[in-house]
Amino acid sequence: MALTKETSAAIVSRFGAKENDTGNTKVQVALLSERIKQLTAHVQRFPKDSGAKRSMMKLVGQRRSMLKYLERRNLEVYRELIKDLNLRK
């Protein structure tokens, strides 16, 4: 269920300043978003998998706190990231 190396590398290269820039908040939020998408599909297919639901909600909370941090630190980057990831309607 984890992200593949190729998927992770593509996300890091798209959102990071360099290809090794995995600590960047934008990269972390993008990786969490991809993982949440995978878990959402899994939970829709297997609705009784409470462990997957719990881990998905945990990841959503982590992403929310990172987005709050990014919003406080750099509003322009926050708005751009929200638009790129289609997180808000």
Image (cartoon, helix red, strand yellow):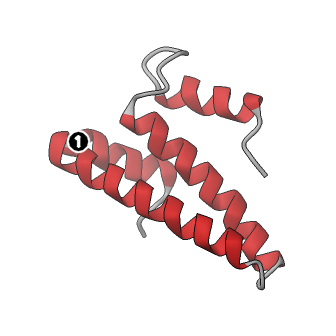
The residue depicted at 42 percent of the width and 28 percent of the height is: 23
Percent across and percent down for residue 71 are 22, 50
Q: Is residue 82 left or right of residue 4?
A: left
Q: Amino acid at mark 1?
A: Glu
Residue 76 drawn above or below residue 60: above
**Which residue matches tag 1?**
76
Considering depth in this image, is 87 or 34 the residue closer to the camera?
34
- Please identify the residue farthest to the right as the structure is shown: 45
Residue 67 drawn above or below residue 47: above
Q: Secondary structure at mark 1?
A: helix
The residue depicted at 39 percent of the width and 29 percent of the height is: 24
The residue depicted at 75 percent of the width and 29 percent of the height is: 6
Residue 3 drawn above or below residue 82: above
Percent across and percent down for residue 80 are 35, 44
User: Dot 1 surroundings within 10 Å: few (below 14), some, or many (20 or more)?
Assistant: few
- Please identify the residue farthest to the front as the structure is shown: 51
